[in-house]
Amino acid sequence: MATRRALHFVFKVGNRFQTAYFYRDVLGMKILRHEEFDEGCKATCNGPYDGKWSKTMVGFGPEDDHFVAELTYNYGIGNYKLGNDFMGITLASSQAVSNARKLEWPLTEVAEGVYETEAPGGYKFYLQNCSPPWSDPVLKVTLSVSDLQKSLNYWSNLLGLKIYEKDEKTQRALLGYADNQCKLELRGIQGEVDHAAAFGRIAFSCPQKELPELEDLMKRENQKILTPLVSLETPGKATVQVVILADPDGHEICFVGDEAFRELSKMDPAGSKLLDDAMAEDKSDEWFAERNKPKASG
């Protein structure tokens, strides 16, 4: 499993202006690439929506060696109801803390040197006021689970993530494919995991030849496959193959062929301008405001 790596987490966003401000100006991330699509994704990357949408990749550095965020924006949808499934992303960045203070972005100190904040849409981020232990400041993604042991069996035994930490008392575990990669933290909660409309997706890569094997394994183990092996095209860029799975609590997991993804995910120097141009051309906010109507909820 040493050839597998954590790639990104997918967020649905309702306001691209505020979201871009948060990731660029507050967190200090870069726009790595921006792509516009006229119809919904075959692997429901943008959620269960068929219309026009965009994808913006943001991170502290190239996708080859940084865990990034994928921001999906569905035209005409202004907000998404949050569930209890996504519990936060933790970053080690004193610069982000400094930026937030300077820009008066709300911060709440929840532990010594650790600040909770929210991205537009209500997604939680935890900012550690320190330097990162490796080149990527993104340390972990935290997801809720209803049965920690059942989830560990899935993520470790079937998907091959190494268990770095496990604490039955606090009902948490930390997993990952490599020491210097973003980790996945699982936290046990009381009751069911509710994904609501804002549900995200975590993505990993593996050698392309492993994708059919992974799909076959899930079939044999009677695990949920949301999208069987499919090719996804991006105009003018590499075509990638993906399999979309769901863990025992319904958390969506994308596995993509690493070789083609490295081609697709090359940083586009024009990415920031493409996003700014798309936002300038998007008149949907004005259209709804003129008619005194709210945008749709996801």
Image (cartoon, rainbow, N blue to C red):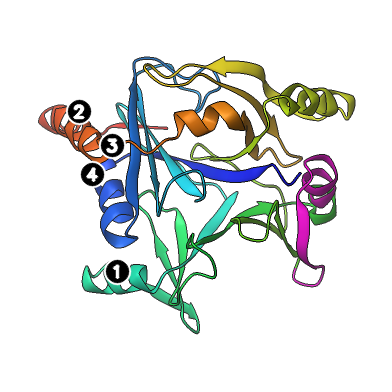
Residue at the disc numbered 1: 100
- Which residue: 73% across, 39% down? 247
Q: Around disc 2, counting alpha carbons within 10 Å, would you say few (fewer than 14), some (14 to 19), or many (20 or more)? A: some
- Which residue: 74% across, 71% down? 170
- Place of residue 150 in the rendered image (x, y in percent of width and height, measured from the top left): 84, 48
- Label 3, label 2: how many angstroms apart (C-alpha)? 22 Å
- Label 1, label 2: how many angstroms apart (C-alpha)? 29 Å
- Which residue: 79% across, 45% down? 160
Relative to 287, is 32 on the left or the right? Answer: right
Residue at the disc numbered 3: 271
- Label 3, label 1: how many angstroms apart (C-alpha)? 24 Å
Mark 1 touches mark 2? (CB < 8 Å): no
Relative to 164, is 293 on the left or the right? Answer: left
Name the N-terminal-most of marks 4 and 2: 4
Front position in the image: 114 or 108: 114
Name the N-terminal-most of marks 4 and 3: 4
Amino acid, disc 4: Phe
Amino acid, disc 3: Gly
Front position in the image: 61 or 255: 61
Q: Quadrant of the C terminus?
A: top left
Relative height, residue 138 to residue 231 (above, below): below
- Does residue 201 appear anywhere in the picture? yes
Give the residues drawn in magenta, as a range. 152-170
The mark closer to the camera, 4 or 3, is 3
Residue at disc 4, secondary structure: helix
Relative height, residue 67 to residue 250 (above, below): below
Amino acid, disc 2: Ser
- Label 4, label 1: how many angstroms apart (C-alpha)? 17 Å
Q: Around disc 1, counting alpha carbons within 10 Å, would you say few (fewer than 14), some (14 to 19), or many (20 or more)? A: many
Instruction: Indicate which disc residue 284 carries.
Output: 2
Name the N-terminal-most of marks 3 and 1: 1
Amino acid, disc 1: Ala
